[in-house]
Image (cartoon, rainbow, N blue to C red):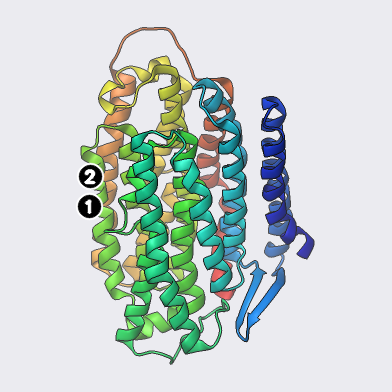
Amino acid sequence: MSGALILALAIPGAGALAIALLSRFPNWREAATLAAAVGLFITVCDLLVGVLNGERPALHLATLAPGLELALHIDPLGMLFGIVASTLWVANSVYSIGYMRGNDEPRQTTFYVCFALAITATMGLAFSGNLLTLFLFYEMLSLTTYPLVTHKRSREAMRAGRIYLLTLIGASMILLLPAIVWTYALAGTLDFKAGGILAGKLGPTAMAVLLALFVFGAAKAAVMPLHRWLPTAMVAPTPVSALLHAVAVVKAGVFTILKVVVSIFGIETLQQTGASAWLVYVAGFTIVSASIVALRADDLKRRLAYSTVSQLSYIVMAAALASPLAVMGAAIHIAAHAVSKITLFFAAGSVYTAEHVTKVSQMQGIGRRMPWTMAAFSVGALSMIGLPPTAGFLGKWFMLGAAGTATNWFAVGVILVSTVLNAAYFLPILTRAFMKGDDRPVREAPLPMVVALTATAIGTILLFFLPGVPLRLASAILGG
């Protein structure tokens, strides 16, 4: 298991090196990308079997000072994040080949190299054994995704890159790092532990302040007001948008918050002190406000971006409810949102590639001309609304049940109102795509793109009918 843990970081890193060496041979370069993605998926599946059987692989890397170590450790929450990221890297790799070639994108080798390095950082973050290790991989993820955000090298792309880097690095240095230092000063350790390490260390007010530093320091979670980097970064190619929204970046943010709630504070401690009560309202405001902005956005990727801002705060709000059922709902929604949102971005990129359409108002009849693409988009949209039989229903069901059990009627109201808003900004797209338009011939995007988006759409439905793995991992989170 320790060997597989090393391979989980080594495979995408070696893939990045192979891609760089094969830069003059596009077919071999892309074969190296696919080989690394498949190799990582197989390795993580091997780790998954062990974790489901009760194993908790760990690896000590270095000791910097007493209580300050670089270490890897796989717990159920990290395993859930790891299997989601490794699975979707395979789909994104297939999709990227069709997209990058179909749009004749420049600097394709740089794109694939940075993508592989970003996955390396994601694996390290998912399998971190303590806050210090997590922080280092968190920063690595910001740095390796910056060239992807600025891929087009246009003035707009460079501006988006500056906002991206300043927001994420600035928040982590000014807020997240002090929170980690404060935690170490209080507990004498940064290790993740089931039940947390801060019980009895702080009063309710100070604990609420420390939680705020973690939440806003993890700006990748895009909790308002630290959310603008996300829609701004949509200037990047669609496979990058998929990486940002589904595979790695935003999931790193909500994963960090959920990890801190469960393994640093402990949900019992938060329940007893009430230190997370304020976060329910901040997350609820983000959910509804971002949904309203999405409702008014005509640019398709901007609408999807604000949908992501809203959906992420479902996870944050569930973590703030600090109950076992809410934590399960948050964990399941990480997987459900990932597979659903990557399907939506894949479809948006396919529409752009085949029809050069970027606006919702331009999508009349697109469903007739691109039936596979828009059928997949429909599945992703229904999942974001939270309708069965799609994965999005599961997370919302658990979160709604947790809010009701806690008699937190604000959270219940937010979930219900935002579900109506989700329907209001997704269903008109489907109506416009399938009910209006002309009889121009069918013309789909390149085959790799269609294969990838069809696979993730099927996965969105399968996750509803076969939720065993995420449910088992989610239920085991509180046990470590």
Q: Which residue is rendered at x = 71% and y = 49% of the image? A: 11
Q: Is residue 285 left or right of residue 129?
A: left
Please determine whether, in this image, residue 404 is positioned above or below residue 142.
Answer: below
Res 66 → quadrant:
bottom right
Mark 1: secondary structure: helix
Q: Which residue is rendered at x = 70% and y = 44% of the image? A: 17
Q: Which residue is mark 2?
A: 293
Image quadrant for the C terminus?
Answer: bottom right
Please determine whether, in this image, residue 139 is positioned above or below residue 237.
Answer: below
Crowding at dot 2, Cα within 10 Å, few <14 / some 14-19 / many 20+, comes out as some
Q: Are marks 2 and 1 in contact (CB under 8 Å)?
A: yes
The amino acid beneath tag 2 is: Val
Q: Residue furthest bottom?
A: 200
Q: Is residue 302 left or right of residue 187?
A: left
Between 42 and 140, the residue placed more toward the observer is 140
Res 446 → quadrant:
top right
Please determine whether, in this image, residue 56 is positioned above or below residue 151.
Answer: below
Q: Is residue 213 left or right of residue 389?
A: left
Residue 385 rendering spot, x and y as whole percentages: 35, 44
Q: Which residue is mark 1?
A: 289
Q: Which residue is rendered at x = 59% and y = 25% of the image? A: 448
Residue 111 rendering spot, x and y as whole percentages: 56, 37
Confirm whether residue 328 shows in the render: yes
Residue 110 rendering spot, x and y as whole percentages: 58, 37
Q: Residue furthest top?
A: 440
The amino acid beneath tag 1 is: Ser
Between 181 and 358, the residue placed more toward the observer is 181
Residue 177 rendering spot, x and y as whole percentages: 44, 72
Mark 2: secondary structure: helix
Q: Which residue is rendered at x = 44% and y = 18% of the image? A: 354
Confirm whether residue 243 shows in the render: no
